[in-house]
Amino acid sequence: MMLVKNYLGLSDIHGIGLFAGEFIKKGQKIWEFIPGLDVELPKSALDSPHESIRSFLQRYTYPHPQDSGKVILDGDHGRFMNHSAHPNSDFRIPAIGLALVDIAEGSEITCNYDEFDPGFDLSH
């Protein structure tokens, strides 16, 4: 779950993006896995017979950091965070995200998908 004020908007990176709704200080925790709000699903859920469910889960889940048989689905706007090779947040520590730099209110919050999903196909 995002721990800072945020909102969705049109992104120059890709489609919809996640934007800071307040000033975020470098080093501030911006996201934390919160059971019950963020969801752990069995990896087999990605094989749903329903195309709409399968497509949604393939787009918005990422591998569980400690259990290869599970995936994580963010329960809030965090799932709209776009990839950047030069992100302003850090997700290398499982279950938390930190601001790498001061992030101005209104700036897009970005992350490097390779930090938590090295197999992600960036061509989508």
Image: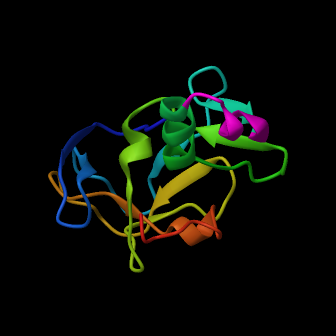
Q: Quadrant of the C terminus?
A: bottom left
Q: Is residue 81 magenta?
A: no
- Residue 83 versus residue 106: which sits nearer the camera? 83
Q: Is residue 74 above or below residue 84?
A: above
Q: Which residues are magenta?
A: 43-50
Secondary structure of the magenta portion, mostly?
Answer: helix
Q: Is residue 29 left or right of residue 17?
A: right
Q: Residue at x 83, y 51 (%)?
A: 66
Q: Is residue 65 left or right of residue 76?
A: right
Q: Is residue 58 above or below residue 42?
A: below
Q: Residue at x 63, y 63 (%)?
A: 117
Colour pattern: rainbow
- Please identify the quarter of the rendering in which residue 107 is found: bottom left
As drawn, the residue found furthest toward the bottom would be: 85
As drawn, the residue found furthest toward the top would be: 36
Q: Residue at x 44, y 53 (%)?
A: 28
Residue 60, x across and y down, in percent: 50, 44
Q: Residue at x 53, y 34 (%)?
A: 51
Q: Is residue 47 magenta?
A: yes
- Please identify the quarter of the rendering in which residue 99 is found: bottom left
- Residue 114 versus residue 45: which sits nearer the camera? 45
Residue 27, x across and y down, in percent: 46, 61
Residue 10, x across and y down, in percent: 15, 51
Q: Is residue 25 left or right of residue 41?
A: left
Q: Is residue 21 visible?
A: no
Residue 15, x across and y down, in percent: 23, 54
